[in-house]
Image: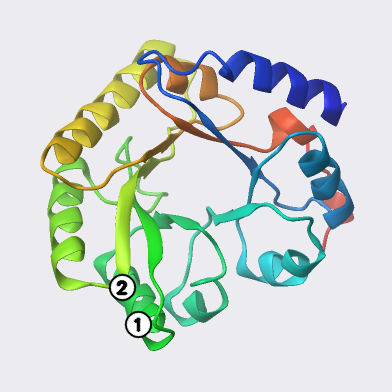
């Protein structure tokens, strides 16, 4: 199943997004075994990402060579386990977190690439900046912190059957991304789209998608502690 799913997705995204940009596929490996992740890597996955620090720590040394990202909520007291060990942190949802990442990276004489997380649907249950606050955050973080590099934006879309609404939100995130990039920020990643909505996201400007279920199938939460 994994091989078939991956082959279909890689073929689908090979055409790029609606703007002709190459799409980065990030395999969301939450609750997947190292063996399963390595099978995905062998079959063409180049980037893998965990949602939880503990899972990252347990699995990272067991993986075949690959690019690793972090896509979950990150607490400031756990940045030491992630900073300098992943290529990109997608989920920076506060200036305080950016500061903690910066301070730890500076101690290690390293740089950490990050994305600014936007709460696209304004949902109380989700973290992230509002659209207006995101602009200020990119500016403040880029100016204040010299050991982090803001490489783009990330957003989680609301769960909705209204495809037009989701498309509108994707367009709005893309407009902000383009505006900030035009101002000179070194943006590369617009990380929008998960298993249930990635087709809408790439049709409306996303160039990075985070897929778990679409690759690996439905997770069996009952087998996990």
Whether residue 117 is visible to the viewer of this picture, yes or no, is: no
Visual colour scheme = rainbow
- At x 44%, y 23%, the residue is 201
Residue pointed to by mark 1:
106
Where residue 154 sits, quadrant-wise, is top left
The residue at which mark 2 appears reads as: 147
Residue 95 percent across, percent down from the top left = 25, 67
Q: Nearer the viewer, residue 87 or 133?
A: 87
Q: Is residue 80 above or below residue 37?
A: below
**Vertical relation: 29 (above or below) 62:** above
Q: Using the numbered discs, state the Cα–Cα distance from disc 1 to disc 2 in whole angstroms.
A: 6 Å
Residue at the image point whose x is 53% and y is 53% from the top: 71
- 102 with respect to 34 (left or right): left
Residue at 19 percent of width and 62 percent of height = 142
Residue placed at 16% from the left, 72% from the top?
Answer: 144
Marks 1 and 2: CB-CB under 8 Å?
yes
Q: How many marks?
A: 2
* Rendered location of residue 60, percent (x, y): 72, 65
Q: Provide the secondary structure element on which disc 1 rests.
A: helix
Most extreme residue toward the bottom is: 107
């Amino acid at each position: 199943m994994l091989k078939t799913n991956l082959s279909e997705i890689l073929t689908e995204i090979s055409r790029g997004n609606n703007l002709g940009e190459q799409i980065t596929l990030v395999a969301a490996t939450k609750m997947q075994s190292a063996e399963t992740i390595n099978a995905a890597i062998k079959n063409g996955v180049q980037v893998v990402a965990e949602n939880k620090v503990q899972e990252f720590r347990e699995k990272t040394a067991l993986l075949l060579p690959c690019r690793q990202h972090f896509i979950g909520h990150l607490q400031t007291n756990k940045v030491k386990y992630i900073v300098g060990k992943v290529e990109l942190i997608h989920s920076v949802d506060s200036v305080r977190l950016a500061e903690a990442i910066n301070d730890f990276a500076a101690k290690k004489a390293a740089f950490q690439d990050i994305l600014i997380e936007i709460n696209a649907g304004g949902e109380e249950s989700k973290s992230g900046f509002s659209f207006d606050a995101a602009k200020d955050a990119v500016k403040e973080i880029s100016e204040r912190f010299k050991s982090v590099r803001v490489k783009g934006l990330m957003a989680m879309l609301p769960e909705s059957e209204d495809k037009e609404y989701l498309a509108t939100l994707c367009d709005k995130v893309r407009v902000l991304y383009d505006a900030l990039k035009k101002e000179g920020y070194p943006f590369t990643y617009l990380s929008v789209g998960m298993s249930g909505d990635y087709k809408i996201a790439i049709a409306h400007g996303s160039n990075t998608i985070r897929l778990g279920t679409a690759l690996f199938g439905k997770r069996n939460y009952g087998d996990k502690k």
